[in-house]
């Protein structure tokens, strides 16, 4: 088959040797031409999507697909698959755990005391005293939830449909989950229904002195509402990896706010070494005439 690799962000030199080794009988191309069977896409060059009418599958190289779905040039009728990369899932869980522990053990606060310098202890809590609420119990949220549970935290999750995960409280009503939540982690896909879900009402419903961790998309967060919740003391800290404008402008208040930790959209990067097997599986499914895995529900938006 002819497989197009089209990305302005993912480096082909990291992907191509692995793809060619796994699919030696297929031909990889990097420019638009006729008879393309499958397109591997992430931030494709302008004009790419409009030229893909008739391909058998568009395989995203990322888990998030909202930009592709929002592009009016996306070819109607062509199936789109998300990339569920085990390496990225593991990395995302690591950063969730790191941030939860940073807040839980007051490390963010002790760093601020070191800058003064000032010697002061604050109350220690058990992990079982804390409830971590996870927005989104899919591949990312489910993995993080299980690992937090193993560390002794109480874990709850919010999702569009009920989920059955042993020892994890599942909610389809966000307000109900927020009333028991100390640390709130956003791992949701971005859809019209989830935009600005991290807002003043959400923060006010949480238990006081908690934290917010946004690793999903910048548009999930109402920035002014977060700053107000931090300045009032209702929230202790926020860990932000994604932003409406990226890179985050140098003048943005998040850079210098004592209650905000910023990372450069680096929480979970697609890892070719673990992702290629998932791509190969879908290529082989297309070859056999079977349904690819992780197809996007266009109506739901992910």
Image (cartoon, rainbow, N blue to C red):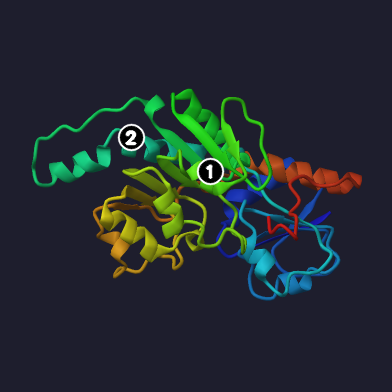
Residue assigned mark 2: 104
Circle number at residue 50:
none
Q: Position of residue 279 (x, y in %)?
A: 72, 46
Depth-wise, is mark 1 or mark 2 nearer the camera?
Answer: 1
Q: Is residue 123 left or right of residue 261?
A: left
In the image, taking residue 114 as reference, residue 30 lies left or right, namely right
Quadrant for the C terminus, please.
Answer: bottom right
Query: Residue 144: in sight, yes or no?
Result: no
Q: Nearer the viewer, residue 31 or 206?
A: 206
Image point (69%, 51%), residue name: 82
Residue marked by disc 1 = 176
- Identify which residue, 42 or 149, lies in the foreground: 149
Residue located 30% across and 54% down the image:
230
Is there any visible trace of residue 111 in the rendered image? yes
Who comes first in sequence, dot 1 or dot 2? Answer: 2
In which quarter of the view is residue 45 placed?
bottom right
Asked if residue 109 is positioned above or below residue 147 in the image, the reply reads below
Q: CA distance from mark 1 to mark 2?
A: 22 Å
Q: Nearer the viewer, residue 218 or 78?
A: 218
Check disc 2 and report its element: helix, strand or loop.
Answer: helix
Residue at 88%, 45% (x, y): give it: 290
Label 2 environment density (alpha carbons within 10 Å; few <14, some 14–19, many ≥20): many
Q: Residue 149 location, x and y as percent?
A: 49, 27
Quadrant where the image shows the N terminus: bottom right
């Amino acid at each position: 088959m002819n497989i197009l690799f089209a990305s302005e962000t993912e480096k082909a030199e990291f992907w191509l040797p692995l793809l060619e080794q796994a699919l030696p009988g297929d031909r990889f191309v990097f420019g638009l031409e006729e008879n393309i069977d499958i397109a591997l896409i992430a931030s494709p060059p302008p004009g790419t999507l409009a030229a893909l009418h008739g391909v058998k599958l568009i395989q995203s190289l990322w888990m998030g697909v909202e930009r592709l779905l929002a592009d009016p040039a996306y070819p109607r009728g062509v199936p789109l698959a998300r990339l569920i990369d085990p390496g990225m899932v593991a990395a995302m869980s690591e950063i969730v755990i790191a941030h939860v522990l940073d807040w839980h053990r007051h490390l963010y606060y002790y760093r601020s005391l070191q800058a003064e310098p000032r010697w002061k202890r604050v109350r220690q809590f058990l992990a079982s005293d804390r409830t971590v609420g996870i927005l989104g119990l899919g591949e990312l949220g489910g993995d993080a939830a299980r690992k937090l549970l193993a560390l002794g935290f109480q874990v709850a999750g919010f999702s569009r449909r009920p989920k059955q995960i042993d020892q994890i409280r599942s909610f389809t009503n966000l307000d109900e989950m927020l009333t028991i939540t100390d640390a709130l982690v956003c791992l949701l896909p971005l859809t019209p229904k989830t935009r600005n879900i991290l807002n003043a009402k959400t923060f006010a419903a949480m238990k006081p002195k908690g934290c917010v961790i946004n690793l999903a998309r910048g548009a999930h967060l109402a920035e002014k509402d977060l700053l107000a919740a931090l300045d009032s003391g209702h929230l202790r800290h926020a860990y932000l990896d994604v932003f409406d404008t990226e890179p985050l402008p140098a003048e943005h208040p998040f850079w210098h706010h004592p209650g905000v930790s910023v990372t450069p959209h680096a929480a979970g990067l697609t890892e070719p070494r673990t992702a290629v097997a998932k791509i190969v599986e879908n290529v082989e499914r297309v070859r056999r005439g079977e349904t690819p895995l992780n197809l996007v529900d266009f109506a739901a938006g992910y």
